């Protein structure tokens, strides 16, 4: 009969602590209201999607917007 759990066997060569991963912010920046206004704002949401084609990270809302074109 198979066991539902496996025992943990620590090994001195294997790190037992998982390093923290830092999540990046969304790369989207809203466009300026008019050319030269400098009022475009960066998105401050945590990026959840990595767009491989653009090599950029986006929050879900902005990824849907960018992927629509």
Image (cartoon, rainbow, N blue to C red):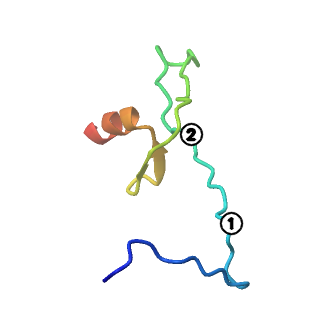
Crowd tier of the residue under label 1, counting other residues whose Cα lies within 10 Å: few below 14, some 14–19, many 20 or above: few
Q: Mark 2 = which residue?
A: 25
Foreground label between 2 and 1: 1
Front residue (pair 22, 11): 11
Q: Quadrant of residue 41?
A: top right
Q: Quadrant of the C terminus?
A: top left
Q: Is residue 40 above or below residue 24?
A: above
Q: Residue at x 53, y 77 (%)?
A: 7
Q: Residue at x 47, y 25 (%)?
A: 30
Front residue (pair 63, 9): 9
Front residue (pair 21, 29): 21
**Residue farthest toward the right in the current orientation of the protein:** 12
Q: Residue 59: image x %, image y %?
A: 44, 37
Q: Is residue 13 left or right of residue 56?
A: right
Q: CA distance from mark 2 to mark 1?
A: 25 Å
Q: Residue 8: image x %, image y %?
A: 58, 76
Of the two numbered discs 2 and 1 on the same chain, state the one appearing first in sequence: 1
Front residue (pair 64, 32): 64
Q: Is residue 27 left or right of residue 54?
A: right
Q: Residue 65: image x %, image y %?
A: 32, 33
Q: Is residue 26 above or below residue 15?
A: above
Q: Quadrant of residue 14?
A: bottom right
Task: Classify mark 2: helix, strand or loop.
Answer: loop
Task: Classify mark 1: helix, strand or loop.
Answer: loop
Q: Mark 1 = which residue?
A: 17
């Amino acid at each position: 009969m198979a066991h539902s759990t496996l025992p943990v066997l620590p090994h001195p060569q294997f790190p037992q602590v998982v390093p923290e991963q830092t999540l990046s912010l969304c790369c989207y920046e809203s466009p300026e209201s008019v050319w030269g206004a400098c009022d475009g704002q960066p998105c401050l949401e945590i990026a959840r999607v990595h767009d491989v084609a653009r090599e950029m990270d986006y929050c879900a809302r902005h990824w849907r917007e960018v992927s629509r074109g």
